[in-house]
Image (cartoon, helix red, strand yellow):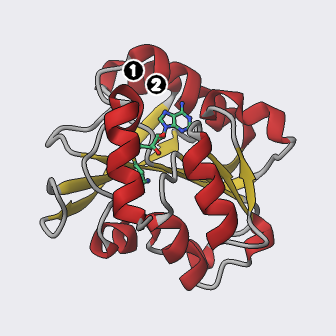
Amino acid sequence: MSRSGLFLKETLRRPGEVVALAPSSRAVARKMTAGLERVSGPIIEIGPGTGSFTREILARGVPPSRLTLMEINDQFCASLKTQFPGVRVVNRPAQDIHALGLHSVGAVISGVPVLARPKIQRDVVGRALDVMAKGGIFVQITYSLRAPISTAMQAELGICADYRGMVLANLPPAHVYVFRRIQH
Ligand SMILES: C[S@@+](CC[C@H](N)C(=O)[O-])C[C@H]1O[C@@H](n2cnc3c(N)ncnc32)[C@H](O)[C@@H]1O
């Protein structure tokens, strides 16, 4: 089955988890992964789906051994393992990020739907911050015009947001935000 076919099948089977009709476009993947070639330490991608962002992370020269994928969907995990030999694929929710045993993580690239889900924001973003390097970045895709994490939740988590931009060449058009821990 093609990657788009698998994606649509899993959207219909688990709409509350996949929350999109098609994999992200290459243009979105480029914006999500910009600068990763200069990031040091482990990189974790959460919610990779069929691997749109994974492909670009590797294309930027990140060695497969530095990359870990956390994906809740077992069908997607099977496809990711076949497509990306040498990349660690973990069939667990991003909420379990501590269990990976990684620290000083340079970047977390997130396709996990967090918009208007405060519990998921605390459990996914909050726990990711615990394993990230001081200057690490949490990059999030959203289909909303607004930041996917409210300013109140940003304050609670001790992070600030940078808007990286919009990508029209995607269904639907997408926005990319970068969150960082506020340095005191
Ligand atoms: C909108 S899709 C994005 C897929 C891919 N990143 C892309 O842009 O084409 C959301 C993905 O997050 C996964 N997901 C949802 N909740 C998750 C969680 N708590 N932990 C890990 N993956 C999750 C879904 O199974 C799905 O693969």
Q: Is residue 62 above or below residue 53?
A: below
Residue mark closest to the camera, 1 vs 2 = 2
- Residue 20: quadrant of the picture: top left
In three-dimensional space, the C-alpha distance between marks 1 and 2, rounded to whole angstroms, equals: 8 Å
* Image mark for residue 153: 1
Q: Is residue 164 above or below residue 98?
A: below
Quadrant (top left, top right, bottom left, bottom right) of the N terminus: bottom left
Mark 1 or 2, nearer chain start = 2
Q: Is residue 48 above or below residue 127?
A: below
Give neighbour class at mark 1: few <14, some 14-19, many 20+ (Cα, 10 Å): some
* Image mark for residue 121: 2
At which x and y percent is residue 59? 55, 84
| Circle 1/circle 2 CB separation < 8 Å | yes
Q: Residue at x 19, y 63 (%)?
A: 170
At which x and y percent is residue 159? 47, 35
- Amino acid carrying label 2: it is Gln
- Amino acid carrying label 1: it is Met
At which x and y percent is residue 171? 17, 58
State the residue in front, 44 or 165.
44
Q: Is residue 62 above or below residue 183?
A: below
